[in-house]
Every structure is written in C-alpha cells, then in structure tokens.
Image (cartoon, grey):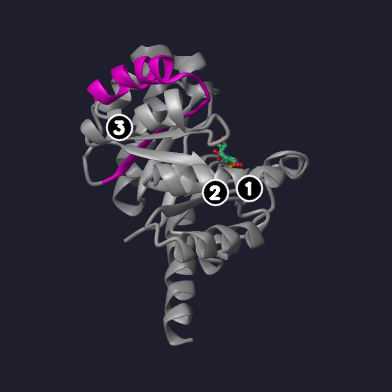
Amino acid sequence: MSRIIVALDRVDKPIDWYKEFITKTQEYVAGYKLGLPFLIRYGIKGFEEISKYINREKLWIIDFKLADISHIMIKTVEPFIEMGYNTFIAHSFIGRQGSLKELKEYLTEKGSKLVLIYTMSHPGAIDILDKTIPLVEEVIANIRPWGLVAPATRPEMIERAREFLHKNMIESKILSPGIGFQGGKPGTAIQYGADYEIIGRLITYSDDPVAEIKEINDIHSRVMRNEKNR
Ligand code: BMP
C-alpha cells in the first residue's frame, strides 16, 4: 500500500500531461490532490476530464482549504462529489455549528471524507495556527474528521497530532505535506506518525516521476519495517 498522495499543482502543462501522468503513476500512489491552481488554469472542465480516471479505492482530494458557512461549503463540494472526487480539505478554525458540523454530515451522507487542518507547513504557521491548536483540537474532537493535515516541515507537530488522536481515541488519518521543496525528507512524516505524505513538486517536476515515486515508496516501506521492529 502506497503512502504517497501527489499534489497536482502544475499549471505550465496542457491537460493531456495530467492524463498521461495519472495513467503512468496511479498504480504506485495512494491518491491525488487538486486545488485552486488547477481550477484557475483548467476550470471545471479540467476536473471533469480528470474525473474519468477516478477509481474509488484511491483518494481523490479536492483542496480548496474551505473556510466558510456550511451552505457555501456544501454548494462548493457538491459538483465535485457528483464527478466522483471523494475527499475534501477544510480549515478547522471556522468552528462547528453552522459550518463544519453540517459539512461533515453532508460529506458522510455522500460517502465522502473530510480532512481538517491541524496546522500548516509554512514558517508563518507558527505566528497564528500553532497557537490555536488547543482550540482546533476541541473542534477536531467534536467533528471527528476522516483525516488531519499536519506538517512534515515540523514533524514534532505530527507527533503532537498523533498523541492527541490517541488520547481521545479518534481514528483520523494524518496527511503530511512539506516534503521535498519545502525541506522535509521523504519518510520523515511517516516516521513521526503520519499515514500519508502529500508530495507535489518533488514528484511532478521530476524527469522520471514513476522512478521517484517508487524510490519514496521504498523509503516508506523501510520506515514502516523499522517501526514494527522497535
Ligand atoms: P509541494 O510538495 O510541491 O511543496 O506541495 C505541497 C502541497 O501541499 C501543495 O498542494 C500545498 O497546497 C499543500 N499544503 C502544504 O504545502 N502545506 C500545508 O500546510 C497544507 C497543504 O495542503
């Protein structure tokens, strides 16, 4: 089982590049993440084109980092659910009532997954997001999302998220960005307790993405073996 989620953020290629990329890589990854750069460059038609490749066993993540009232968030995710995308990322700081509570209920009813931000990978996350963690944890304990985003650039935050989940008997997965171009080494997030590493440019700008993915899968297998032998 692969633990790689590829962030598809390239906007300098025609849509056919994406189709070829997904065809070549899909058997070696856990899923893909598409966000605002893709929307702005290829429009809803681009998402429709990519949706032809969707298979239910993989994570097909829409990452608009939603932060709004429930009505707007539900209207935003609806067309993507109809296309087959199955996982959606939202911020935690917007709170429950009138917002995440209804979004979670809606996604659950549709058989889709909610992923909430624990804290982020950029240095500025220290200024505000890290300081909100106790409050964010309250929201997470209540919403019980399918997954959390925690940064590979500051793996101690992954440990903190893992400990919090364990203590509260919450089964959320941890998805960790920040590998490669942002400084994290492949395998680090898994070692610190993440379930998946979200990796963009290290893979999408590689001359041989399949080889890069296979190499990272090998690193992940080694890390998992070492964890088991501890
Ligand atoms: P890259 O591996 O090229 O740095 O891309 C990272 C991806 O993860 C981007 O799609 C970005 O939006 C996302 N991401 C992040 O980098 N840090 C976060 O804290 C949360 C994210 O979703």
Determine crowd level at label 2: few under 14, some 14-19, many 20+ residues with C-alpha closer than 10 A. Answer: some
Q: Amino acid at mark 1?
A: Ile
Picture residue at 44% right of the left edge, 73% below the top:
224
Nearer the observer, 24 or 62: 62
Image position, residue 71 (x, y; %): 39, 15
Q: Say which label, 3 or 1, has the lower sequence index.
A: 3
Q: Is 188 displayed left or right of 72 in the figure?
A: right
Q: Amino acid at mark 2?
A: Glu
Marks 3 and 1 sit apart, C-alpha to C-alpha, by: 23 Å
Ligand 1 neighbours mark 2 (CB distance < 8 Å):
no
Residue 208 seen in this snapshot = no
Marks 1 and 2 sit apart, C-alpha to C-alpha, by: 6 Å
Secondary structure beneath dot 2 equals: helix
Q: Which residue is mark 3?
A: 105
Nearer the observer, 157 or 54: 157
Determine crowd level at label 3: few under 14, some 14-19, many 20+ residues with C-alpha closer than 10 A. Answer: some
Q: Is 48 displayed left or right of 150 in the figure?
A: left
Residue bounds of the magenta highlight: 58-83
| Residue 84 lies in quadrant | top left
In the displayed structure, would residue 127 be above or below residue 220?
above
Pick the quarter of the image with the N terminus. Answer: bottom left
Q: Which residue is mark 1?
A: 133
Label drawn at residue 137 = 2
Q: Residue furthest bottom?
A: 229
Q: Say which label, 2 or 3, has the lower sequence index.
A: 3
Q: Amino acid at mark 3?
A: Glu
Secondary structure beneath dot 3 equals: helix
Do callouts 1 and 2 mark residues in contact (Cβ within 8 Å)?
Answer: yes
Picture residue at 36% right of the left edge, 46% below the top:
146
